[in-house]
């Protein structure tokens, strides 16, 4: 595993300048090292693509490359040498990559126990996610036991309470979603549904509650992926849709049926008083700031491609300023994404479709602010863009009585959510119309960030919102153009990435770097899939909330950013000479299946996900005019 280089060259002399890490916290390299390990492991060949006699990754090879832990060094050479060996955080990421490539199942139960007892937190996270990814959708009992032992809510009451790190619990829950994907498992569905709205218990660690609840929602959506189109036997009494709607909208947690039975609020409060947390008090109401993100995404994954209008009403956007004030702006983006998942076939790769996602009340307010800015500019009032339209704050009339910053944030997040929906719908297709629509919105975000005219200033949200939306739109374009190496997109990403100041956070660098990597995925040989399982992985990986620091896992577990590897498919079309087995570059003609049209390309050629060809014809004078009919082969 190569070391992370924390040095750079300073122009114009190109002198080398090393980063001074003395003032940074000791854990600032933990997750960057983990990501470095995953990146190194993903370079290995996949176990699915190699035959048994060609397998080069064995259990012995994995065990041989296990790093020496401080405990092992302490036992071998004495107590003084243990402090000289720092913890190896990169190996946990390497183990996760082995699972993503299908090799981690070679380890036995004793091997996994050694890793979990002697490794670091990143090793535990890598083992959980790697094994779950390796056994995805199999409901493997041994892996399930390993994950459940690290989730306190699934342990019997007779077990001694354990203090587990929040990242370990979150990775175990994410592993449950991967392991039971598409199974509609009754126990796991009920457990995940309860965990979304779980209150903090006693005085255990309450760190990263938002991220834990989100992962419960994502896992719930994976377990019941695309099951909303048909009734799943045995789950009707759980009232999944009703409870998810309650998590989204908020309100009292106690149902009416319990109140009718004579259970008073005082009795309920007294029964739970012993389990209350002394630092966090949420009464009996649902904290939708924590529950809404996971519930919103879960609803979209369960009813993906169902076009269920009844369920989609839970995700409707506010149409008045009063309702807009009661919904967090970033949740509007999630609602747009989930509604687009439900109405999958209604997504159109046009700028008009993106504009149609913005509610009329937001459009009219933006137009009002722009007109007020133009009038103020004509009179020379350009000092403060919030004072351009003082009539907004005077309360004169309902049309102008609104919060300008809330409107700006709402439009930015809704547009970013619509771009992300386009990215999911046309992931790996290289659709020029979808790419152009997203490209146009990225330019709009850049103009909001860089332009200084008064009309632009009236539309600009806060810096954090603008950066998040810009990164989301960039990642959406990368999903559409994955594996194509599109030069226009590459130039745009480099232009965005060039800026480096105090407002450019760790998550911004991470997102833009990932976008460039997706653009050249597999050296142009791979692209992203857009099946329901692939969509679930893409949402989990590219969830539009990015870390502020390298150690930030509060709203999303950083290790999940690598699950996109489960949605990667090889789509390269190559021609091989039968005499010497060399790959050759020849012109070919591809006939479309649903029309009489044909296209002429040159191998190697990247097939998009929506490619539907009937036959291939060789158009070279050096070789026989071979014709391959796709109907004669099981081609996917």
Image: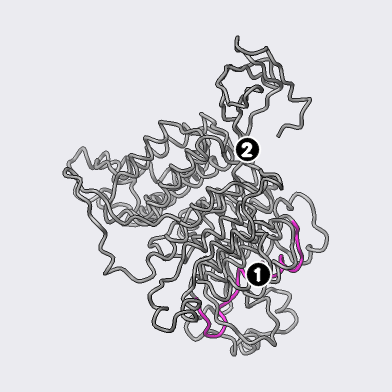
Give the spatial CA distance, label 2 vs label 1.
Answer: 38 Å
Give the label on residue 570, or none. Answer: none
Are there few (<14), some (14-19), or many (20+) residues within 10 Å of tag 2? few
Is residue 466 in sight in this rendering? yes
Q: Residue, x 61% and y 59% (percent of image)?
A: 218
Residue 185 part of the magenta segment: yes
- Of badges 2 and 1, the one in the foreground is 1
Q: Nearer the viewer, residue 306 or 124?
A: 124
Q: Is residue 381 above or below residue 489?
A: below
Q: Residue at the far right: name it.
A: 233
Q: Residue at the far top: name it.
A: 621
Counting labels gives 2
| Residue that carries the numbered disc 2 in the rendered image | 346
Residue numbers of the magenta segment: 183-206
Earlier in the chain: of badge 2 and badge 1, it is 1
Q: Position of residue 355 (x, y in %)?
A: 48, 38
Q: SS at mark 1?
A: helix
Q: Nearer the viewer, residue 449 or 572?
A: 572
Q: Residue, x 65% and y 38% (percent of image)?
A: 345
Give the label on residue 147, or none. Answer: 1
Snapshot quadrant of residue 599:
top right
Residue 125 part of the magenta segment: no
Q: Nearer the viewer, residue 587 or 485?
A: 587
Q: Position of residue 335 (x, y in %)?
A: 55, 52
Q: Is residue 453 above or below residue 552?
A: above
Is residue 318 in sight in this rendering? no
Image quadrant occupied by the C terminus:
top right
Q: Position of residue 219 (x, y in %)?
A: 64, 61
Q: Nearer the viewer, residue 628 or 449?
A: 628
Q: Residue, x 61% and y 34% (percent of image)?
A: 571
């Amino acid at each position: 595993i190569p070391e992370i280089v924390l040095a750079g060259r300073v122009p114009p002399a190109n002198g080398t300048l090393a980063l001074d890490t003395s003032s940074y916290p000791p854990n600032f390299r933990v997750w960057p090292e983990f990501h470095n390990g995953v990146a190194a492991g993903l370079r290995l060949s996949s176990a699915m693509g190699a035959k048994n006699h060609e397998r080069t990754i064995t259990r012995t090879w994995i065990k041989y490359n296990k790093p020496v832990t401080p405990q092992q060094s302490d036992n071998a050479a004495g107590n003084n040498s243990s402090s000289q060996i720092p913890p190896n955080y990169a190996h946990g990421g390497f183990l996760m990559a082995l699972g993503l490539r299908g090799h981690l199942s070679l380890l036995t139960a004793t091997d996994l126990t050694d890793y979990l007892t002697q490794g670091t937190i990143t090793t535990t996270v890598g083992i959980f996610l790697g094994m779950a990814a390796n056994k995805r959708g199999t409901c493997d009992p041994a892996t399930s036991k390993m994950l459940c032992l690290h989730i306190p809510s699934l342990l019997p009451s007779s077990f001694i309470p354990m203090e587990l790190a929040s990242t370990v619990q979150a990775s175990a829950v994410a592993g449950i979603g991967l392991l039971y994907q598409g199974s509609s498992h009754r126990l796991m569905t009920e457990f995940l549904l309860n965990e979304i709205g779980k209150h903090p218990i006693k005085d255990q660690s309450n760190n990263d509650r938002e991220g834990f609840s989100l992962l419960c929602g994502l896992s719930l959506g994976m377990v019941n992926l695309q099951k909303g189109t048909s009734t799943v036997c045995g789950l009707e009494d759980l009232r999944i849709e009703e409870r998810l709607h309650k998590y989204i909208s908020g309100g009292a947690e106690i149902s009416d049926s319990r109140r009718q039975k004579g259970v008073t609020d005082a009795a309920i409060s007294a029964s739970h008083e012993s389990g209350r947390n002394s630092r966090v008090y949420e009464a009996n109401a649902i904290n939708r700031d924590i529950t809404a993100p996971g519930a919103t995404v879960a609803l979209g994954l369960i009813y993906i491609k169902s076009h269920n209008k009844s369920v989609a009403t839970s995700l409707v956007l506010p149409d008045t300023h009063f309702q807009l004030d009661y919904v967090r702006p970033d949740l509007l983006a999630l609602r747009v994404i989930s509604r687009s998942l439900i109405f999958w076939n209604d997504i159109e790769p046009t700028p008009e479709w993106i504009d149609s996602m913005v509610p009329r009340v937001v459009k009219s307010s933006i137009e009002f602010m722009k007109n007020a800015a133009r009038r103020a500019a004509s009179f020379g009032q350009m000092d403060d863009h919030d004072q351009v339209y003082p009539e907004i704050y005077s309360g004169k009339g309902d049309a102008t009585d609104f919060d300008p910053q809330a409107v700006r944030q709402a439009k930015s997040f809704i547009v970013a959510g619509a771009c992300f929906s386009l990215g999911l719908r046309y992931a790996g297709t290289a659709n020029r119309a979808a790419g152009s629509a997203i490209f146009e919105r990225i330019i709009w975000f850049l103009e909001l960030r860089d332009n200084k005219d008064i009309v632009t200033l009236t539309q600009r949200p806060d810096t954090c919102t603008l950066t998040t939306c810009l990164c989301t739109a960039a990642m959406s374009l990368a999903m559409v153009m994955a594996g194509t190496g599109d030069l226009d997109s590459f130039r745009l990403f480099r232009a965005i990435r060039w800026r480096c100041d105090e407002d450019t956070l760790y998550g911004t660098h991470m997102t833009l770097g990932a976008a460039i990597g997706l653009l050249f995925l597999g050296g142009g040989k791979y692209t992203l899939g857009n099946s329901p399982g692939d969509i679930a992985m893409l949402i989990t990986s590219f969830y539009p909330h990015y870390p502020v620091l390298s150690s930030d896992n509060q709203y999303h577990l950083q290790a999940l950013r690598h699950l996109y590897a489960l949605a990667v498919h090889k789509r390269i079309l190559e021609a091989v000479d039968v005499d010497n087995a060399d790959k050759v570059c020849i012109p070919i003609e591809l006939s479309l299946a649903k029309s009489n049209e044909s296209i002429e390309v040159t191998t190697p050629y990247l097939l998009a996900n929506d490619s539907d060809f009937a036959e291939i014809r060789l158009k070279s004078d050096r070789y026989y005019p071979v014709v391959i009919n796709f109907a004669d082969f099981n081609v996917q």
